[in-house]
Amino acid sequence: MPSFFTIMLSLLYSTKIVIAFVIFLITLSLVGLPLVFFILRWKFIAAKQRRKSEKQIVGLFHPYCNAGGGGEKVLWVGLLSLQRKYPDCEFYVYTGDVEATPQEIVEKVQKNLNVTLEKNVKFIYLHKRKWLEARMYPYFTLLCQSLGSLYLGFEALSLLNPDILIDTMGYTFTLPLFKYVGGCKTGSYLHYPTITTDMLKRVSNRVAMYNNRNAIARSPFLTAGKLFYYRIFAALYSWAGQSSDVTLVNSTFTLEHLNNIWSQPLHLVYPPCEVDHLKKIQRGNKHLQKIRILSLAQFRPEKDHPLQLQALYELREIIPEDLFANVILVMCGSCRNEDDRMRVKDLQDLSKHLSLENNVEFRVNITYEELMEEFANAYLGIHTMLDEHFGIGVVELMAAGLLTVAHKSGGPLLDIIETSEGSRLGFLATTADEYAHVIRYILYMSEAEVSGVRERARASVDRFSTKKFQDEFLRAIEPLFK
């Protein structure tokens, strides 16, 4: 048996170790981290000053530049606008699409997004993009993905330290790195806030969603813990946002939510929407025998494609069987990775489970020409994402003359679709049953009603045109080039 004196010595020794460890952590925080910061800043800025190029170097941070979605349309149209206004600059795109050559990326941009770039663009390939993937982090996903973006940003900065860095994908935590360590001017185009007050409310109200698990929603203790975590993350997100010298947002939804989190000027610049070509598509007075409902969205969980299948299932219950036999839901969208391809497989399985396989078509990663054919052949458009930040696909459906029903939230509600009688541009719904009844209503609309909605919708989309975006984008981003 150890004596009392021995036990007291052991405790005293353990206490000294703990105190020493705490002092070490405090010293590391107060001395070590600032020292590392100043060494890295000196290293990167000195390297930039030694650079022989007299041209201004502009980097665009978009790790998924080859995905072919609406966010990529913003990147490429924005880049093309900068190339034409600042031809003496050198432009680099940071991408994690290591499997695609520069030529393949440029050709896909032209083929799928109808954007022909100038030749003065180069690519910086990043090999640590996997740390952005949500699948890597089963817990604390938002925080870990943000730290992953910081890790990827450091790789990008190590490969090329630009004079101007523009983040076009919403990885806000990379901005302090480029601004304070790299000495860059920084700008960002935000498609949606990483965290919103609505997210906090849903967690507080214990609503189960794709970003709030059932186990957390059912537990008051876990809900309180997640709320604390979200508030800490929101404070960090706000701090990172202050590093953006010029911040552009794509919608009223994003603007309002960021105003609640950030405290700096924001420029509302609607994303570029392909309206000129689509408005030229000829529409007859009556839909074809096959009633094609076009869905246009990347295959990501937040787009809520299952809701479209559920709406189709509900529609079968409220219209005659012979009419439903002619209804085809066409799901067009791009896949970024294996996770997205698995979602398509799950949707195909769900359509079979609901006995809808004869009424659903999947068109994945189709070309621009093929997409134009789908626009021409469709009669209705559908979009189901809750809190869609803007909705380029919704605008394009309306521009093509399709009678469009979108989710009653976010950009479609605040910016795009007017639903009051006499000035109706489209339709809004929330549940599968509401979508089904709206579609049924559309199928029985008179020719005059159809023409009225179609003409007003097509006239309204010019405010979202590519030309409008280019002018507003260049005006907002100009201070970075002075």
Image: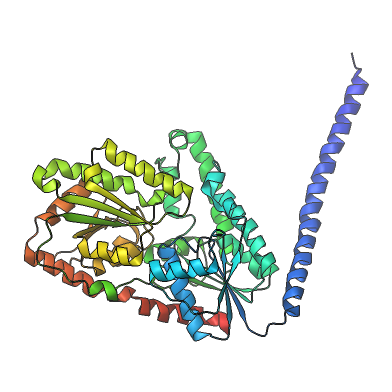
Q: Quadrant of residue 357?
A: top left
Q: Is residue 323 left or right of residue 426?
A: left
- What x and y, as percent, mark residue 398? 24, 66
> What coloring was used for the rendering?
rainbow
**Left or right of 78 on screen, residue 124:** right
- Taking 218 as reference, is 24 left or right? right
Rendered residue at 67%/66% (across/down): 159
Res 95 → quadrant: bottom right
Query: Residue 420, position in %: x, y?
Result: 18, 64
| Res. 417 visible in picture | no
Report how many numbered discs are placed on residues in the image. 0
Which residue is outermost to the top? 1
Image point 48% across, 62% down: which residue?
66
Query: 124 or 463, which is in the foreground?
Result: 124
- Please indicate whether residue 291 sits to the left or right of residue 29 in the image: left
- Picture layout, residue 259 above or below residue 330: below
Point out the image quarter for the C terminus: bottom right
Q: Position of residue 339 (x, y in %)?
A: 46, 47
Quadrant position of the N terminus in the picture: top right
> Which of these two is toward me, 339 or 198?
339
What residue do we see at 79% from left, 65% from top? 39
105, 76: nearer the viewer = 105
Q: Is residue 389 visible?
A: yes
Q: Position of residue 59 (x, y in %)?
A: 58, 72
